[in-house]
Image: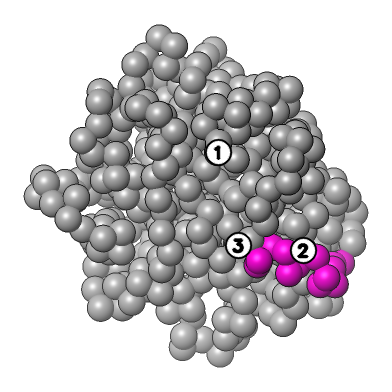
Amino acid sequence: MQLYSTNNPNLRVSLREAVMAGMPEDKGLFMPVDIPRLPEQFFQNLASRSFQEISIEVAQHLLQGAIPARDLDAIVERAIDFRAPLVRLDDSIYILELFHGPSLAFKDFGARFMAKMMAYFNRNESKELLILVATSGDTGGAVAAGFFKTPGIRVVILYPSGKVSPLQEKQLTTLGHNITAIEVDGTFDDCQSLVKQAFLDRDLTSSLRLSSANSINIARLIPQTFYYFEAYKQAMPSKGPIVFSVPSGNFGNLTAGLLAKKMGLPIARFIAATNANDVVPAYIETGVYAPRASTRTLSNAMDVGAPSNFARMLDLYCSTWNMIRADVVGFSFSDEETQEAMRDIDKTYNYVIDPHGAVGYLALRKYQQENPCTGIVLETAHPGKFVEDVTRILGHPIEIPSSLAELGDKEKRAVSIKANYPLFKSWLLQNA
C-alpha cells in the first residue's frame, strides 16, 4: 500500500510512514494511491460473516500487504472486539449503535485500531513516540482508552475548556500514566490548529517523534469503513436503496463511508448531518466552501468550523462539486430542533438518542420526505455521556452505564493553557 498527499499527488510513502507521521509536511492529508474494489463473492457471502471476519477482509484488501496477514488479523481481532448492532425504529429508519466500545463512542473503532497498529510499527523503536490529538468531545476519551499504558507511546490530548460534557472531560483527564490532558482556553478549532502547527514545526519534529490520533491520521479512517459493511449486512434484505445519515463534525466518519463506497459497498447516498456548523452542507448546496470559527451547540462533538477531512472528500471526487453532490446531500439543524427530535424519538419509539444522533435522525427524516429509502442513522455516542442535557430535555432519568457512573468520583487532572502556539510549543519542549 502506498499513499500520497492531497496537496501532492506525486508523493509516495508507505503505510508505516503515513501512520507514524500523521500528516505530510506539505499540510495535506494522506490518501491511498489505490482503493481496491472488493470481489463480488465478498458481498455474496456477507450475511454469513462475523463483524471481525468482515473487518479483516476489508483491511486486507485496502492495505494490500502493507502488514503481513497474520499480524494484521491480530491487530483487527484485538481492536474490533465489540459489536455494532443495528436497531430498528420502524420499517424505514434504523439506528447503528456505535457506542459499545470502552469509551462508549464510535471513536473507539479508530482509536483502538490505530493504537494497535502504531504499537506494531513502534515495536522496535528506542525513542518514545508522542501522540498529539485535539478533541471536540469523544475523540479524547477514545484515544485515552485506546492508548492507555501502551509501551513506548505517550499521548497529549488538547480539548476546549468548558465545551465538552463533564463525563467526556472525565474520560480524558482521569487516566494519568501515559495520558496527559491539556485544557485549552478556546475552541476545538484552536486545539486542532495547535496540533497542526506542531507537526509543521521543525524545531519540534527534529527533537520529538510526533504523530497524531485525530482523523487526519489515515489509521483512524481505515477501521471506520468496517462498520458500514457490518451495517449493510444487518440491513439486508432492505426495501429500496440504503442511505446513511452521518452526524458530522470533522467529517472523518463520512469520509470513511465514502471509502467503503469506493470499495464497492452499494450505498445509494450519504447524508451529511450537521448542527449550526454547516460549512459542508453549505458547500454541497452552493459549491462555495467557506470555513469559519466554530459555533458552540448542544451536539458539541460536531462543533467544527474548518473540518480537516473535507480535503479528503474533495480528493475522492477530484474536487468536482457535481460528483460530490451525486453521492452526498447535507442538512443542518438548530439546538431547538435537536431537542424536539430527542423528545419525539423517546415518545414515539421508546428509544433514547444522544444529541448527535438526533441531528442524524432529523437529516434522514428530511431526506426521506422526497426520497423513499432504508435509512441508517449513525448513533455516535451513548446518551449517558451527555446525561445532564439528555435528562433535562427528556424530563426523566436515563440509564447510565457503570463505566460512566464510576467516573464521577475520579479526580480531573489537566494542564490549562491559552490558545497560543508559542506557549504550547514551550510546554511540549519542557515536558515531552
Name of the residue lying farthest toward the top? 370
Q: Nearer the viewer, mark 1 or mark 2?
A: 1
Number of marks in picture: 3
x, y (%) of residue 137? 69, 51
- Tell me if I can see residue 16 in this picture: no
Q: Observer-nearest residue: 234 or 57? A: 234
Mark toward the start of the polypeptide (3 vs 1) = 3
Around disc 1, counting alpha carbons within 10 Å, would you say few (fewer than 14), some (14 to 19), or many (20 or more)?
Answer: some
Task: Tell me, for residue 102, which label it has, or none.
Answer: none
Q: Amino acid at mark 2?
A: Lys
Q: Which residues are magenta?
A: 402-415
Residue at the spot of label 1: 351
Marks 2/3: CA–CA distance: 11 Å
Q: Secondary structure at mark 2?
A: helix
**Residue 20 drawn at (x, y percent):** 50, 68
**Residue 425's x, y, as percent?**
80, 64
Residue 170's tag is 2
